[in-house]
Image (cartoon, rainbow, N blue to C red):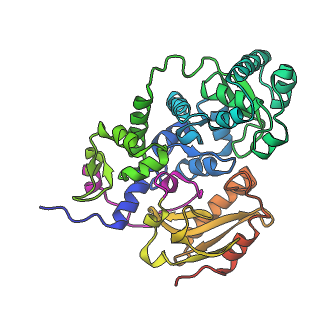
Amino acid sequence: MPRQSVTPELLRAWWAHKQGLLEPLVSATPAAVLARAGWARSVAGAGPYLTLHARAGLSREAVDAAVAAVEIHELPAARSCTYVLPASDYALALTLAAAAGDGEMKLALKLGVTPKEVDALCDAVVLALKNGPAEPDRIRATVGPKARSLGADGRRKGLASTLPLALDRLQVSGHIRRLPINGRLDQQRYRYALWQPNPLKNCKLSSAEAYAALARLYFQWIGPATPAEFQWFSGLGVKTAADALASLGLVPLETGSDRLLFPHDLDALWSFKPPADPVYRLVSSLDSLVLLRRDHRSLMDPADLDRSLELAHGPAALSSLADLPCHAILDRGRLVGLWDYDPASESIVCLSFIQRNKNLDAAIKNTEEYVRTQLGDARSFSLDSPKSRVRRLAALRTGGGIKAA
């Protein structure tokens, strides 16, 4: 009997299933959750905590303990972007970061910095950290003139001194790692420590092998996906991305579809039965369900595509935005609402695209209590503050500027 077309509802639920967002991952460790759902984008916001809480109900304390035990870590990876990822992927992430190149060093060369100078500074930093972890100011004081200011020109271009060059290079090479000052992932103050043993010590991955390994993980996390979606996530060129996919044995979701997945996943998808009842999850605006493919439109019902939100620059249709402007409420993979946290009232403010009900209210209350008692706030990224959120909160509260056309 020929297969029928995959419906949007089935596809959304399948993605949610792959991501661990349908049934709670009971007793799963933070590392196990990230191995299944994919690397959690880290921009000094609450995203990694929300990722782990939505899937496994993990407390902030459990996540921070996993960070302290180096079972998970925040590292530069694909496109040199930072992610929180499991120990099993440390070597791969650093190999990818190295292959992405050092954009700041290119800028530094224009400011008169030489590679030899940075090499000497790296040696001095490693020596300084032999006495234990240290914050940048202490490292700067210890290495002395080997770390120098790049003057007004450097400050204008976002590179005030040579020390960040050395710290970044030593992180990518696995010689040092950065530790959040208070052990939390939702802040941007760090100490640096020697990393022993170096996670790259026995790694012999070539760049091409690393790209293929990333592609395999990617389609395990979020298949079916398109080559273009993988290319965006990986930051690779068209040919290099195609080469990475070539050995995976991916097949089209349907005849003529550009969405690809593993053959065993295709078989599993056709036998997959989505839950009959709603499964509400409150996740970050940068949740891997959304960010891996960077296509929240595919998670929306057609009736919701014309909804608009009042942003700082005026109203904008949600379907026209590259990324979600607020955190997301999901039901079996469908985007059914938006939310943000208001520290002043210690409450979640949300707009639902569907009729509110007791199960949705319970999911909102659960996340609200988690944010209030364990996080204190739910910033999307480092510069997201209660002040910058005022207009969004007002729109969510009143529905002002949010409507179906």
Residue 54 spot, x, y in % from top left: 56, 53
Q: 331 or 245: nearer the eye? A: 245
| Residue at the left extreme of this rendering | 1
- Relative vertical location of residue 106 with respect to residue 323 in this rendering, above or below: above
x and y, in percent, of residue 90 in the image: 54, 30
Q: Position of residue 195 (x, y in %)?
A: 65, 21
Instruction: Decide which of 82, 338 is in the foreground and name it.
Output: 82
Seen at 71% across and 46% down, the residue is 186
Q: Is residue 111 left or right of residue 238?
A: right
Residue at x-position 64% and y-position 46%: 59
User: Which image quadrant: the N terminus?
Assistant: bottom left
Residue in the picture at 45% in, 79% down: 303
Q: Is residue 26 left or right of residue 140?
A: left
Question: What residue is drawn where x is 63% and y is 64%?
Answer: 326
Residue 69 seen anywhere in this rendered image of the structure: no
Q: How many marks?
A: 0
Determine if the magenta segment contains residue 187: no
Residue 118 percent coordinates (x, y): 71, 23
Q: Quadrant of residue 338?
A: bottom right
Magenta-drawn segment: 267-294
Location of residue 388 by image quarter: bottom right
Question: Farthest bottom residue?
Answer: 405
Tell me, yes or no, whether the highlighted magenta stretch contains residue 280. Answer: yes
Task: Say if 348 sits above or below 47 in the image.
Answer: below
Horizontal side, residue 323 vs residue 243: left or right = right
Q: Is residue 339 above or below residue 136?
A: below
Along the viewing direction, whichever of 306 and 240 lies nearer the viewer: 240
- The answer to whether residue 314 shows anywhere in this view is yes
